[in-house]
Image (cartoon, rainbow, N blue to C red):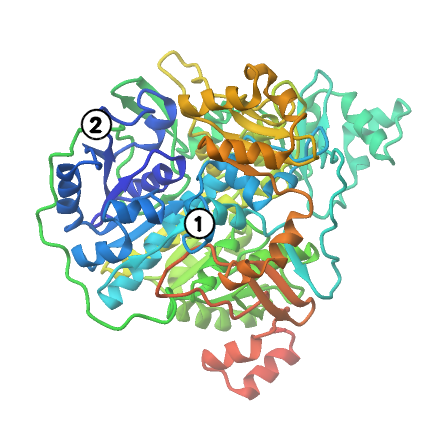
Amino acid sequence: MLGDLRIIEIGEGMAVQVAGLMLCELGADVLKIERPGGDSARGTAPFANWNRGKRSLLLDLDTVAGRATLSERLANADVLLHQFTPARARALGLDDASLAAVNSRLVTCGITGSPYNHPDVERSDDELLVAARIGAMYENDGHRAGPIVYRYQQGSWAAAHLAAAGILARLVTRLHSGTGGGAHTSLFQGFMSTLPLVWARNSQGPMPNPPVYPLAARPIAMQLFQCQGGDWLQIMDPSQQFDHASLPTMWEVMAEGVEIDTPEGLVEAFKRRPLENWLADLRAADIAVEPAYPMGEVLRHPEVVANQYVVEVEDPELGKTRQPNVPFHTDADLPQGRPAPRPGEGGERDWIAPLAATSEGSSPEEILEGVRVLDFGMFLAGPMGPSMMGDMGANVIKVEALTGDRIRFMHRYYQAAARSKRSIALDLTRPEAQPILERLIQWAEVVHHNMRFKGAAKLGLSEAGIRKYNPDVIFNYVSAYGQKGERGNWPGYDSIFNAIAGWEFENAGEGNRPVFNRPGTMDVTSAQSCLVEIMASLYAKRAGGKGHTTQTSLLGIAAFTQGERLIGPDGELSETYHLFSDQTGFSPYHRIFECADGNWIAVAAHKQEQRSALHSIFGADAEGFAQSAKTRNSGELLTAMEAARVPCDIVNFENAMHRFFDDPLNRELGLISVLPQPVYGVVEQLGAFWYFGDTPIIFKRCCPDIGEHSVEILQEIGYSDVEIAEFREQKIVG
């Protein structure tokens, strides 16, 4: 799909490696630049997982010879993907202006800690510090008061997807303009992209703004129950209207005198019977449900195997392994199962063939200007991807039932998934709607949905049904479990895949009961994966290829996020690190500390000299750091750490959302969108997830009302006012 692309990747951070992996697995030739002696993570599961299929070139970029060799490779490359701050990039001659002089066609993506145009961009890109900086540590459930550290690296996973999507978007623009440019993102913006479900404000409407959370432990159960024997069960019923009393097993429990009308009674009821009983009953009722597994066990799941979300790889250092596969599948012929390279392997091969010719035209005002997307997505895992395309300038039409998208009752969720779209309300169950559907599909360059397969086919939205009207359209869909295996038509939502991936246990801290993940990370990451594969298809088609079919799933994402682990030759899971039981961090040197003034500070001391400095500052051994911090003020400690060059940050947690939206700098930098909406008044949302330099992101549309644009859309596809009036009278269109 991306076989003509030549990408240079520099960096040892998770985000840059995962972004490179996705582009590599989509067919690009990725050359990984490593320090002399190789990447420090070689021999570990993350290195093996995140560097599959790449080539390796060992270079010392602090030498003239190393920089000269890199410059030679960049002259024939399409993309440079790195994790340098702007200052470090300038020092190496890798800033956007210098690179444009070397290769005007080059697309550059720097993944930093804070946004590329933000004053904090030179600060550390450690995930923990970025979470502290943005204020993400009070948005998750925990076992105690105060900020909570999560094990899942939501900033890095999101930033990896944003980077891959931004690069491809810039490459689509290059096909028209002939020139490259920046497509930068950050872990900060990665967090931003995962927080819209809980961070948004509106001036009026049916849903109040999020409250300021009390400084106390948050509830840790949302349809999460312990069963007889100690197993945990995660149910996801978004409307929360399912009658548990309809379950045969629940009849037995109620006959024993258990009252289920209270939360406490329901908790007790589930404890009365084993996990298997509840799973059977709930699945028979078509309720989304899964056990909460330990991290990594999903790689053995039969549906993961059936859908090829795990791949066998003969790794040169680890032997025969089973590794998490990328979460997307396509009808394109793509290489799979290639191992990570040995140090320097393949690096001697230069790109000597001439670059493909591109047109020389004017740059568009928006990155995806002129791209036409038809979105039938509902809830979150599907439609958030097209929404982000709309943010980049694509013309996105949301097709929904006359009653609207079913996520509308969860107002902030709907706002997050429907920004930058227009809405047409259409009753696809009516035969009279089919001619309208035909014209809409013919209009589209991209068609997307996340319906269950049987329901989509009934509405004429199977792949065959769509291609009947537009044979060369780009078609993408998101499912719960994938299209193969026994669960291809089962329902599924974010929380049950957090459970099956092991994140509900991992995020809880060692030895603790699992916790619910509020930001909806599996939904958001699925949507971002959908965005990456759509953008890859769009580039491939506009570069002279065909309109591909691509798909991803929540189960695929659950498996993909296990990249720190693999199944080794002995059949055992590789080891990984875990979160402290008090949810404060991962080691004495990489955690948050409560201070005497009530503030918390975050510290990421990875180098030996930084760790030695911490011992001097705290005046104690590692086990005594936390107690020492409680006797010192946060300002004093931060000053001492910064003087000793120990990466650190104040933890912004209390009232973090309101502080973010009230900060004029965030508005100035486009990190907040402020738009009117017919129901909610003025809506404030997290804004630009990329920095494209010369091509700004312009927010023009808030989430639409049901059928808000039906008339104008019908006019655009050729219907007269008389025909439109008749459609509305017959209640085919709303």
Q: Quadrant of the C terminus?
A: bottom right
**Mark nearer the viewer, 1 or 2:** 2
Spatial CA span between label 1 and label 2: 36 Å
Q: In x, y percent, where is residue 695? A: 37, 66
Nearest the viewer among 333 and 681 is 681
Q: In x, y percent, where is residue 157? A: 46, 40
Q: What residue is shown at x 41% (from left), y 14% (from top)?
A: 571
Q: Earlier in the sequence, mark 1 or mark 2?
A: 2
The residue under label 1 is 530
Q: In x, y percent, where is residue 180? A: 26, 59
| Mark carried by residue 36 | 2
Q: What residue is shown at x 59% (from left), y 41% (from top)?
A: 494
Is 358 left, or right, of 253 in this rendering? left
81 shown above or below 711 = above
Is 688 left, or right, of 334 in this rendering? right
Does the image show residue 492? no
13 shown above or below 197 = above
| Mark carried by residue 129 | none
